[in-house]
Amino acid sequence: MWPAILAARLQANTATANIGVVNAGISGNRVLGDNNSGLARLEHDALSVPGVKWITILEGINDITGGSRHNAVRLIAADDLTGAYRQIIETAHAHGVKVIGCTITPYGGSTPSNAYGESVRAAVNRWIRTSGAFDAVVDFEVATRDPTEPTRFRAEADSPDLLHPANPGYKLMGDAIDLSIFMARR
């Protein structure tokens, strides 16, 4: 949803009208793990796309929700995700591709939400914003969070599951991306 909004914004701007968007996001994807994880899909789904100049990374909530439950085989730590992000960044940079880090949106009130998972999400978002590891950062958390209850979506962004944004939330996300990121010298 938000990639389509970004694509429309890029096309409407004469300075970015020559930039296309490939949406390779899949439901339930994780950064870590085997099979369809972000690390396993990076080369095929992102870096091998002809003409790729940037990739966005918006992954981690499924790692957190699965790895922060009391019955998890191993509790996830923020360092697990940030280490995977670093690996993605290094691999992309080796291919001459810039990486845009996207903060993880709120999930408070959803069925998998818990205090430990929220602490991991907050730590990961802090790292995304402050590490300097990414070539640019898009703050989807700020775009979608409730200012009075920041662990939850704001009313217009919320959906029935409290985990994924509703369509207006995806619009907030697509509109939160500063197009000057793509105007910088390529």
Image (tube, rainbow, N blue to C red):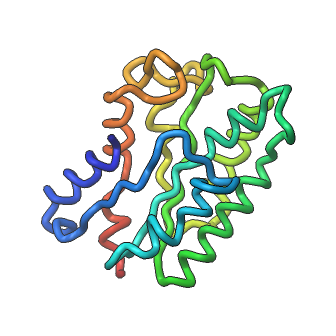
How many numbered markers are drawn?
A: 0
Q: Residue 8: percent from the left, percent from the top? A: 19, 51
- Residue 34 sits in which quadrant? bottom right
Q: Is residue 46 left or right of residue 65?
A: left
99 vs 44, nearest the viewer: 44
Q: Residue 71: percent from the left, percent from the top? A: 84, 27
- Quadrant of the image for the N terminus? top left
- 123 over 52 or under it: above or below: above
Q: Is residue 34 left or right of residue 103?
A: right
Q: Residue at (44%, 21%) from the top-left corner?
A: 158
27 vs 83, nearest the viewer: 27
- Quadrant of the image for the C terminus? bottom left
Q: Residue at (52%, 72%) from the top-left corner?
A: 43
- 168 over 176 or under it: above or below: above
Q: Residue at (67%, 69%) from the top-left corner?
A: 87
14 vs 70, nearest the viewer: 70
Q: In this view, does 165 lie to the left or right of 130?
A: left
Q: Residue 53: percent from the left, percent from the top? A: 38, 75
Pick out the residue farthest to the front: 35
Q: Is residue 75 left or right of residue 18?
A: right
Q: Residue 20: percent from the left, percent from the top? A: 25, 65
89 vs 152, nearest the viewer: 89
